[in-house]
Image (cartoon, helix red, strand yellow):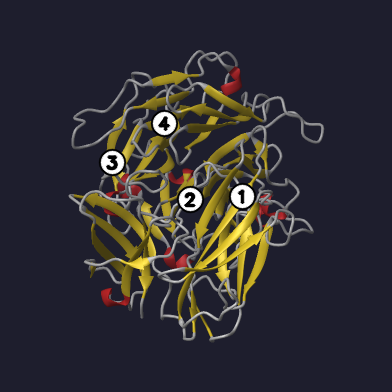
Amino acid sequence: MALCWLLALPLLLCNAVSVRANVYATNIKVNGSLSAVGVPLGAAAQISYILNEPASGGVIIKISSTNALVRTFTIAAGSPGTLRGTNVATWDGKDNTSTPVAVGTYSIAITASSQGYAGWAQITDDQTNGNAVWEGRGIAVDQNTNSPYYGRVFVSNAAVNDPGANNWLGYQVGVLKCNADASYADEGGLSTGGYPWAGDGFSPWHLEISSADRLYVNDFTTNGQVVAWDPTVAPNTELLALRPDNWTNLSVTLSGPAISGRGTNQALWMADAHQNSSSQAGLGILRYALLSDGTSAPGDKGTVAVALGGSLTGNPVDVALDNSGNIYTIQGNSDVGDTNNRVFRFPPFNPASNSVAITQADWAVGAGDDTMAGANGLAVDPTGTYLAVAFTGILGSGSNGCTRIFFTSNGAPVVNLDLGVTISGLSDHQDEDCAWDAVGNLYYIDNWFGVWRAVSPPGSNSATTLSVPTIVIGGSAPGGPAPVITGITETAGVVTITFTGATSDTAADFSVVAAATVDAPYTKVGGVIITATGTPGQFQASVPTGGSGPTQFYRIKRIT
């Protein structure tokens, strides 16, 4: 039996979506709530959702009980409900035969479809307030389909400027928080997290959000400290994930972060960009095992996974991993005619089996290619097919800045965004960082124009999102927040699902439900053992599977 989060394998252990789609539904709410909502018998419920672009192929909304599909809404393209931004549909509490449904809990699945584009196409508007960012340095997108913040876009802004009459939040120092349509997050579009960012162009720096919904932000000014928050970047959720006690010496300048693994097997990866002395070599790429709270252990200096002296001729400036553990990194060579390679893939590194650091790359590209000048950020798409790299361009000129996509298998080019593209009479670009969402759209920061953009892959497509909030007909909603899956593993025919709830919850408050497809009716799974992990609000479910069987999608259901 195999596991995956977004792959079609014998057993699907997540609330999955197609990885090739460009339009998809996020921020699904019931009566304005991101958690379960009680609705009186016979009363209507409002279902709202955000589309990141128009659904040119229409939208289908399915409402199911635990044992049957009860109502389907089909919305034609161009109609309300298929438009970019917030859409609202009303369910009158009746089934497809106009009969009122019975008392019970009902789930919502929204499928958005698009006719697609002939090539990679920008789907955001540079004039939208939420896309404005003054000194954008890092970008990340929440790919956790079991999170109410699924699809949220995070952008770090590292210098302040006058926000003007439009009050652009991206012109203030901190982390910009936007929905998938570039509108500001409900609780506020910007947060410092209570952290004293320097605002000097390097603090905050790159960022990444883990599968457990924890946002990690790099402070490049402080030798590379990494701070973590929940997806709201609320000050009371701050954790110091990487600190001075984790540094080998004060010469390191750690850039990243990258997060690999799930649950209790997560690791933090950093690249030692080593800006303090051009004459002293850095450490290469470091791996830190993370504790259950998502932070590195006190005094852990990390393990050198990729060292300088082989394929890496200089200090790396960022790092990313695919689901197979392959390591990708870049060198920020920005001089004209530089003969060193700029983009690399190295084989997986496992501290238990790799006795020494890796030095030889599987492949390397970019030697003497000035269209790859100033590599500054990179990201691998969810399928592991594409590697995107953001290039700032030739040093000091802004020329040749672009974002390029390569095949991860061999480094062959796929497409070059921005290079040679004239916008508002200007052809220079300064691309700082890039990221992917769960359905295969690419996001990047063009600092020359002071915006972040989203780009859709070519081809027609669709994606289904199962909502976190449920509708409880004829009763009050279960107490506490909706549970969020944080990790899934499978061993010897037993699936282990880790998830979070409220700190006051007990294991008896939850059950596991499953379905053969993401939008099919979900039924309770028998033989499940749910236990508390010892940390308030964190739980583990053990689900027997027998090691084989049909495709299954699992969710954690609150029952009290």
Q: Residue at x 65, y 24 (%)?
A: 400
Q: Secondary structure at mark 3?
A: loop
- The reply to whether the C-beta atoms of the residues labelled 1 and 3 are less than 8 Å apart is no
Label 1: few (<14), some (14–19) or many (≥20) C-alpha neighbours in 10 Å: many
Is tag 1's residue or tag 2's residue first in the polypeptide sequence? 2
CA–CA distance in space, label 1 to label 4: 32 Å
Q: Amino acid at mark 4?
A: Tyr
CA–CA distance in space, label 1 to label 2: 12 Å
Q: Is residue 204 visible?
A: no
- Name the residue beneath numbered marker 1: 113
- Name the residue beneath numbered marker 3: 302
- Where's residue 191, x and y in %? 56, 61
Q: Residue at x 49, y 65 (%)?
A: 234
CA–CA distance in space, label 4 to label 3: 18 Å
Specify the quadrant of the image occupied by residue 524. bottom left
- Where's residue 233, x and y in %? 50, 61
- Name the residue beneath numbered marker 2: 17
Is tag 1's residue or tag 4's residue first in the polypeptide sequence? 1
Label 1 or label 3, whichever lies nearer to me, is: 1
Q: Quadrant of the N terminus?
A: top left
Q: Nearer the viewer, residue 393 or 386?
A: 386
Label 3 or label 2, whichever lies nearer to me, is: 2
